[in-house]
Amino acid sequence: MIRKAVIGGTGVYNLSQNSRSETVKTEYGIVEVDIVNIDGEDIVFLARHGKNHSFPPHLVNYRANMKALEQLGVKFIYATVAVGSCNELYNPGDIVVIKDFIDFTKSRPLTFYEGGEEGVRHTDMSSPYCYNLTNIFYKIAEENNMQIKGKAVYVCTEGPRFETEHEIKMFMQLGGDVVGMTNVPEVVLAKELGMCYLAVGIITNWCTGVKKGAIEFHDIENSITKNKELITRSFLKSLKEDLHQNNCSCSKAIIEL
C-alpha cells in the first residue's frame, strides 16, 4: 500500500520522469496516476486536470480521483492550487498555504455520502487542512529558504470563467484572500476519507478589478514555472518526514447520525 501522494494543479503535471503509470478503477470512474519511487519509497502523483490539462475545473472527476488514492492506500496528500489574489499583501509569484475555504461552486458532486443505505453523515470542517502537514511544510520551507508569504482563505468558484469585479469585491468582504476553481470538493472528499490533506497556493495573477489590466496567460504561466519545482521538491521532502495521524482530527471528521 502507498501511503503518500501529491496532487498537481494547473501547470504541475509530473514529479519525475522516473515513474510508472497505473490505472485505477473506481466506482466513480477510471483514474490514471503515476507511481514515483523516491529514495526507495513509492509516492503517488495525480494530475488533477489530466496530464494534458484536458479536464476543466467544473468537470474534474474529484470523487474518482480521491477514491483512487484511497484504494491505493493513501493517507497523506500535498496539493498545489493555482490562484488569483484579492489580497494586496499577496502578489503574483508568491506562495501561500491554504488555511480555510469559502465554497461558491454550483453543480459539482460534493460528497461520497448521498443517503440511502449508508444513511446520513456529516463532515466536521473545523480544520479542513491538516495542521500536521502544515507544520511540516513550514519547517521544510524554512530549511530550504523558501518564502511562504502567509496563510490564505481560498474562495472556490465554479469556473471555467474568471470572476467579475463585483464578485471579487464580495469575496474580499467575506474575508477571502485568493480565488481558485478546484480545491472544493477535493479538500472535503479528503476529509470524508480520513486523509490528511494540505493545499499550497501559487499566486498567478491579480483577481479581476484588484489592479488595472486584464488577466494574461503568460503571467499565469510565468508564476507557475517559477514556483512549481520548488514546491514539489518541498512536498517530497515533507513526505519523507515521520507522518502520522495521532494528533490531528483528519481521520475522525465523519459524524454519523
Image: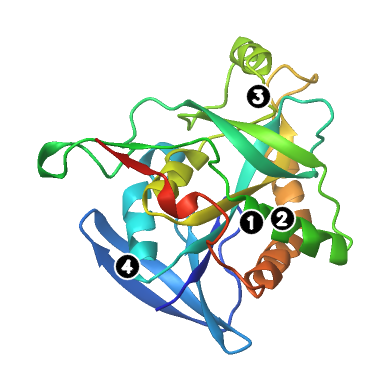
Q: Which residue is mark 2?
A: 135
Tell us which disc is closer to us: 3 or 2.
Answer: 2
Residue at (49% x, 60% y) in the render: 47
Q: Residues within 10 Å of mark 3 (few under 14, many from 20)?
A: many
Callout 4 touching callout 3 (CB < 8 Å): no
Q: Which mark is residue 132?
A: 1
Examine the rendering and report whether any part of residue 64 can be seen: yes
Query: Disc 3 to disc 2, how far (Cα)?
Result: 22 Å
Helix, strand or loop at disc 3? loop
Residue 100 spot, x, y in % from top left: 60, 35
Helix, strand or loop at disc 4? helix
Q: Which residue is mark 3?
A: 176
Q: Residues within 10 Å of mark 1 (few under 14, many from 20)?
A: some
Q: Amino acid at mark 3?
A: Gly
Examine the rendering and report whether any part of residue 61 can be seen: no
Residue 114 spot, x, y in % from top left: 21, 37
The C terminus lies in quadrant: top left
Q: Which mark is residue 58?
A: none
Whichever of labels 1 and 3 marks the residue nearer the N terminus, that label is 1
Relative to 73, is 89 above or below? above
Whichever of labels 4 and 3 marks the residue nearer the N terminus, that label is 4
Frontmost residue, 211 versus 94: 94
Q: Which residue is mark 4?
A: 71
